[in-house]
Amino acid sequence: MDSGIGLLPAAVAVRRLRPDADLVLSLDPAGMPWGPRTARDLTERALAVAEAAAAQRPDALIVGCNTATVHALTALRARFEPELPVIGTVPAIKPAAAGGGPFAIWATPATTNSAYQRDLIRNFAEGVAVTEVPCWGLAEAVERADETAIDAAVAAAAALTPDEVTTVVLGCTHYELVAERIRAAVQRPGRAPLVLHGSAGAVAAQTLRRIGAQPAPVASPEGTVTALLNGTAGPLPAPALAYAEGRLLRAAAPVR
């Protein structure tokens, strides 16, 4: 679940571990973006999107959105667990800090400077130089697949990123869809290749652990993909097909 197509990276990561999994993608196109909303409003919308997904009787619910995890994870777990495991998306601050070099966290303005993110920095990155970079409009531009707006938002965030940064944490799942564009904007000439840390792989692995499942062989029968747009089954939003992740999921077996 997510406000929009930011859930694609996690969905594809699950698909790679379990090609046979039937995926339900629950989106909120009527309410996107969630970032500028109040915590209460965002939580109400997240619960509605989650209810639509839960009606499909899944084995687990992935909150494929950093902002929703920051503001709504407690409410989602109170509503659905223990019957339905709820897996949040946490910025990859711990592995970034383990690299030892200065790093930046690119996130939505709602997540940047939040108590949640500050706690992660305090718990896992003490003694490491960390720069929090608010990425104004980037998630919205990615959601629309607006190339000009993506370039402008990435350039603005890159300008706020110190030259000495060696690693960037992608603190919004939408950003993983344009990871290489972010790398190109931040990479400094003559420096070692920039390291990017997303969350999709770790979220997929944690999901399998929570439900006691193992990765399946690549040759497994392919599962289905169902998209729910404000609770109604329909096609993936057209901008999703601008990204490799969206095209991969569109090519999945039809809904049974």
Image: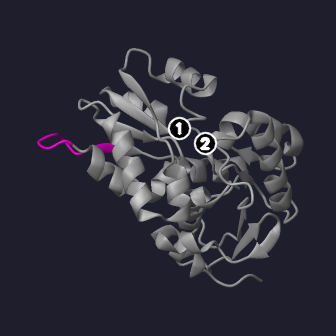
Real-space Cα separation, disc 1 to disc 2, in angstroms:
7 Å
Task: Report the number of discs.
Answer: 2
Which mark identifies residue 66?
A: 2
Q: How is colour applied across the structure in the image?
A: one colour
The amino acid sitting under disc 1 is Pro
Residue at 65% over, 41% down: 36
Q: Identify the secondary structure beneath mark 1.
A: loop
> Between residues 7 and 14, which one lies in front from this camera angle?
7
The amino acid sitting under disc 2 is Asn
Q: Along the horizontal axis of the image, is 197 left or right of 75?
A: left
Q: Are marks 1 and 2 in contact (CB under 8 Å)?
A: yes
To which residue does mark 1 refer? 91
Could you tell me which quadrant the C terminus lies in?
bottom right
Q: Magenta segment range? A: 188-195
Residue 108 drawn at (x, y percent): 54, 40
Residue at 67% over, 69% down: 21
Residue 243 drawn at (x, y percent): 47, 69
Magenta segment's dominant SS is loop
Q: Up-down: is 91 above or below 64?
A: above
Residue 131 drawn at (x, y percent): 40, 26
> Between residues 132 and 202, which one lies in front from this camera angle?
132
Residue 237: quadrant of the picture: bottom right
* Residue 200 in view: no
Q: Up-down: is 222 above or below 84?
A: below
Residue 60 drawn at (x, y percent): 75, 54
Residue at 86% over, 46% down: 80
Could you tell me which quadrant the N terminus lies in?
bottom right
How packed mark 2 is, by other alpha carbons closer than 10 Å (few <14, some 14-19, many 20 or more), is many
Q: Up-down: is 159 above or below 144?
A: above
In magenta segment, residue 55:
no
Q: Along the horizontal axis of the image, is 13 left or right of 116?
A: left
